[in-house]
């Protein structure tokens, strides 16, 4: 065996050195990531699935904040007063508005007198 044959054998054995193996690993990883990105349409399909759920969760958190409930309570209280002093021909429209607005807030978080008023409006429809 000549020194050239030995050199070729050593050269072929050192093909998979650590830096080259790491480079191939990174290249394969990038290839799989690219294929996955293309397969999901650039993550658009995942976004279409999760975005409405996240928005809904954020909306539920917002609707349970103290500021939102307090604002709705004040608004419904003003509508209650307007309903009590309104002419009989305006009361059906106010009743519908109050019931519609009350449906956007958890009634158990409203004051008891306002809950009773809203319940009485719902029963009179």
Image (cartoon, rainbow, N blue to C red):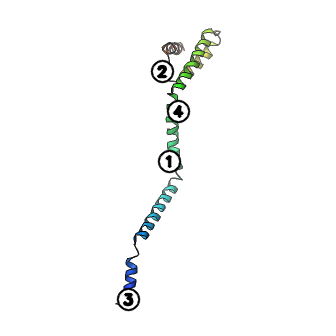
Q: Residue at x 49, y 31 (%)?
A: 61
Separation (CA) of disc 1 from disc 2: 36 Å
At which x and y percent is residue 54? 50, 39
Image quadrant where residue 77 sits: top right
Q: Residue at x 42, y 66 (%)?
A: 22
Query: Can the viewer see residue 104 in this picture?
Result: no
Left/right placement of residue 49 relative to residue 16 reads right
| Residue of label 3 | 3
* Pair 4/1: label in front: 4
Separation (CA) of disc 4 from disc 1: 20 Å
* Pair 2/3: label in front: 3
Label placed on residue 98: none
Of pointers 2 and 3, the one earlier in the residue sequence = 3
Query: Badge 2 local density, few (<14 within 10 Å), some, or many (20+)?
Result: few
| Residue of label 4 | 59
Q: Residue at x 46, y 20 (%)?
A: 108
* Pair 3/4: label in front: 3
Q: Residue at x 53, y 45 (%)?
A: 48
Which element is circle 3 on? helix
* Pair 1/2: label in front: 2
| Residue of label 2 | 109
| Residue of label 1 | 46
**100 and 106: which one is in front?**
106
């Amino acid at each position: 065996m000549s020194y050239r044959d030995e050199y070729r054998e050593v050269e072929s054995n050192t093909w998979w050195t650590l830096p080259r193996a790491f480079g191939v690993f990174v290249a394969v990883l990038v290839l799989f990531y690219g294929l996955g990105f293309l397969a999901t349409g650039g993550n658009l399909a995942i976004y279409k699935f999760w975005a409405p759920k996240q928005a809904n969760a954020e909306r539920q958190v917002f609707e349970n904040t103290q500021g939102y409930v307090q604002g709705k309570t004040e608004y419904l209280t003003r509508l209650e007063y307007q309903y009590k002093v309104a002419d009989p021909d305006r009361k059906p429209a106010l009743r519908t508005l109050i019931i519609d607005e009350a449906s956007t807030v958890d009634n158990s978080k409203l004051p008891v007198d306002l809950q009773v008023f809203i319940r009485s409006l719902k029963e009179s429809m």
